[in-house]
Image (cartoon, helix red, strand yellow):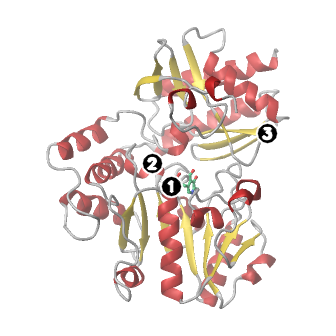
Amino acid sequence: MPWNDNPFLAQGLASTTLTPLGLRVVSARGPWLQTDDGRLIFDAISGIGVSNFGHQHPIIQESLRNQLDRHLHVMVYGELLQEVQEQAGKLLLETMPEVLDCVYFVNSGAEAIDAALKLAKRVTGRTELIGIRGGYHGNTHGALSVSSNESRKARYRPLLPDVLFLDWNDQRSLDKITERTACVVVEPIQGDAGVRIPHESWMHALRTRCTEQGTLLIVDEIQCGMGRSGKTWAFEHFGITPDVVCMGKALGGGMPIGALAASRDNMASLAHAPSLGHITTFGGHPMACAGVVGAFQAMAAVDQRAQEVRMAGWQRRLEAHPLVQVVRRMGSFFAVELDHPDRVAAVVHKGLEGAPGSPGKGILLFWFLSVPHAFRIAPPLTLRDDEAAEGLELLIDTLDAVQST
Ligand SMILES: Cc1ncc(COP(=O)(O)O)c(C=O)c1O
């Protein structure tokens, strides 16, 4: 392994890839990352769907500062009441359907999924778990078990037993949901599969089949939630009410936190027989909850209509570019397909290097784990018109530069 070329491994930090982008970031504000060599990089992916409200949003910063002066961690989750957790829970539940009236704050998206799988086993007394082909739910053993990309799972088997998969948008495969099935886990917009948007009729049929079989429908809003799709939660586009909603990423406004929402009756099953059915030291950390409070307040100020106009403009320019084959988009969440994975790599690297027309500036784009011939775009929802125009020019200049090589 050529570890001395790897900027993480070379200094004893774990690396997730042998070829990290390796930019050294010194500060970030709005949609811009500043690097140690003085360049400004337009963050067109929001840290993979985390900085939905840009970097250093003043409302989020203020909420964090307020909490910093009060207290940090005081006790494992679920024993001592803390005002900031209550505030975060209230704001979150105001965005949920009425039946989902209880939230459990955990530490990450994958932990929210794992807790939701456990909850489904408790509520139904069943063991079978169902995922969807193309789905991605995280990297713990539980979340990986219901994720579909076999090439990323094979070396970690055995994973959880009794897991099946349904085909995306396929009505017939819904027959696999039976009275043995504890839950189905679905992303209302599949992120890692390249922003795949389901048919509304399929989402309805999935909801109906789960209800008929007494199966919990768990919706993974970790990447497509918090305004990313144009609505607060992506499931709202499809007129369904899930049994459990898993959240993470942008939920904390840049702080690490995950959450699951369910009914109080269902959630109560984690508190008895046995008690402490899911416990976490840092879940609902006060600073992370302050991030949640700030994130919901920042989201309330987002003008989704204006953002839709900006993003529709990005889509038109992208679709008109000769290098681009297909654009899939919902709200501010895009997959851009090119003709070959090598072109995608060229675009990502050229973006960081900066196109000739914009010295000292670049743009951060990124891969999908499971769609090698496409790249993702997910800019902050708080872009001003001038920032959106500049980001788009950087993007198009990058595509032009790759096309001319
Ligand atoms: C849809 C979806 N679910 C779950 C996760 C896992 O979240 P985390 O990385 O916080 O564990 C991700 C992360 O990319 C995701 O995109």
Would you name the residue on which mark 2 appears? 250
- What is the CA distance from the residue labelled 2 to the residue labelled 1? 8 Å
Residue 47 placement (x, y as % from top left): 51, 38
Where does the N terminus fall, quadrant-wise? top right
Name of the residue lying farthest toward the left = 70
Q: Would you identify the image quadrant in which residue 44 lies?
A: top right
Disc 2: CA contacts within 10 A as few (<14), some (14-19) or many (>=20) = many
Q: Which residue is drawn at 70% across and 83% down?
A: 177
Disc 1: CA contacts within 10 A as few (<14), some (14-19) or many (>=20) = many
Q: Would you identify the image quadrant in which residue 102 lies?
A: bottom left
Figure check: 96 above or below 390: below
- What is the CA distance from the residue labelled 3 to the residue labelled 1? 25 Å
Nearest to viewer (mark 2 / mark 1)? 2
Residue 156 placement (x, y as % from top left): 68, 60
Would you name the residue on which mark 3 appears? 373
Residue 218 placement (x, y as % from top left): 55, 72
Q: Give the amino acid at mark 1.
A: Gly
Would you name the residue on which mark 1 appears? 225
